Image: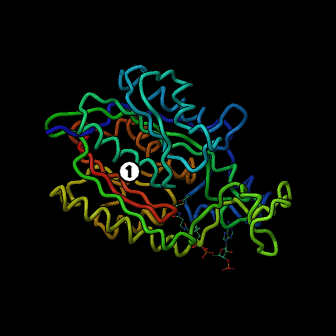
Amino acid sequence: MIRGTILGTGSYLPKFRLTNAELEKLVDTSDEWIATRTGIRVRHISGPGEETSKIAAQAARQALAMAGISPEELSQIIVGTITPEMTMPSCACLVQKEIGAVNGYAFDLSAACSGFLYALDIADKQVRANPDSKILVIGAETLSSRVNWQDRNTCVLFGDGAGAAVVGSARGERGILAGKLFSDGRLWDLLHMNAAPSQNPFLGGEDGGGVDPSRLGTPRKDSGSYIRMVGREVFKNAVRAMEDAVAQVLREAGVSASDIDLVVPHQANIRILQSLGERLGISQEKIYINIHKYGNTSAATIPIALDDANREGMLHRGDMVLLCAFGGGFTWGAELIRW
Ligand code: ACO
């Protein structure tokens, strides 16, 4: 049987590190509150030359080097991101230019914190259909640009970073055994970020009027393009949804929770991961956690964690590795890999 498999991983974290102590100077918070409620101690913030596509390309170069694949061999680049530096072209096209992947095609995928998982699932299906494909899957975010640094409810949670994986085909037992993706747009407002202001100037206005050409050029009120979140509701939904997705994936693969060697989950809150472990009957030592170093980097958390675990020698051939994520949309899912 042919399946998608991860041939190499890479990651990049911006140089500047923002500690909880520094956040105490910005908003009414404390290192103790942030660490106990979330597990976060430090996050990285992008500086000049560290735009989303640039950090994505850095992660990509590492993943390609580990996989022993040249950029010219790539058939596709998929970037999961909600913070591309441009609406057009896509972040993926900019990465393609940066690394010189001249023979493939590239596109972005918007699924918030589940972006990498969605992209990985697509790559797996592509590789099953075309086993010669080599697909670069990236999760990259510069959330610092979209965080309200006056809002203590959100600004302590997020960070910037990028992670990447090269997906190719494997025969036999290795590779992605099962994957399940979900979304529920009905709950969109519990976790959302408006698009950067852009509106048809012919439409509407303060008075709700119709089409009016004289409004062309009238300054618009910024409706707030920051991340907004009803944290407690998101927390409850995240635990329930990931538990369900994992149960479905295990059932599909005919694998039990006790067979899992390592869970590499989306890193949003250490308490979500503890709760998830308890519900699934998976011990905490088997759940990879690096949120203390990076915070929530949305689509980038899983590939960064995967790369950290890989470089720390925690992933061995034949290991059963479980990925799961939950994010804005809501979007969520799980993928089971035999490494
Ligand atoms: N410092 C100090 N106090 C704070 C801070 C802070 N940084 N933030 C909030 N508080 C206060 C609140 O104002 C509130 O005070 P009040 O009781 O006087 O009103 C109190 O702390 C408790 O607030 P809650 O929001 O109820 O705190 P909770 O225990 O739920 O923790 C948190 C908040 C960390 C946000 C948690 O709900 C969470 O992690 N939610 C899920 C996040 C998540 O999974 N996101 C998904 C992915 S993100 C994406 O897709 C981009």
Viewed as shown, does residue 88 lie left or right of 10? right
When the figure is inspected, residue 21 is found, relative to residue 303, above or below; the finding is below
Q: Nearer the viewer, residue 122 or 308?
A: 122
Image point (15%, 58%), residue name: 254
Image point (78%, 61%), residue name: 222
Q: Amino acid at mark 1?
A: Val
Query: Pointer 1: residues within 10 angstroms few (<14), some, or many (20+)?
Result: many
Can you give x and y, in whole percent of width and height, for residue 329 in the image? 50, 64
Can you give x and y, in whole percent of width and height, for residue 250 in the image? 22, 59
When the figure is inspected, residue 139 is found, relative to residue 218, above or below; the finding is above
For numbered disc 1, what is the local secondary structure? strand
Can you give x and y, in whole percent of width and height, for residue 309 in the image? 40, 41
Regarding residue 50, the answer to whether it shows in the image is yes
Q: Quadrant of ligand 1?
A: bottom right
In the picture, the quarter occupied by the N terminus is: top left
The residue that label 1 is drawn on is 264
Can you give x and y, in whole percent of width and height, for residue 42 in the image? 62, 49
Examine the image and state in which quarter residue 285 appears.
bottom left
Colour mapping: rainbow
Viewed as shown, does residue 132 lie left or right of 230? left
Image point (51%, 59%), residue name: 268
Regarding residue 32, the answer to whether it shows in the image is no
Q: Nearer the viewer, residue 43 or 73?
A: 73
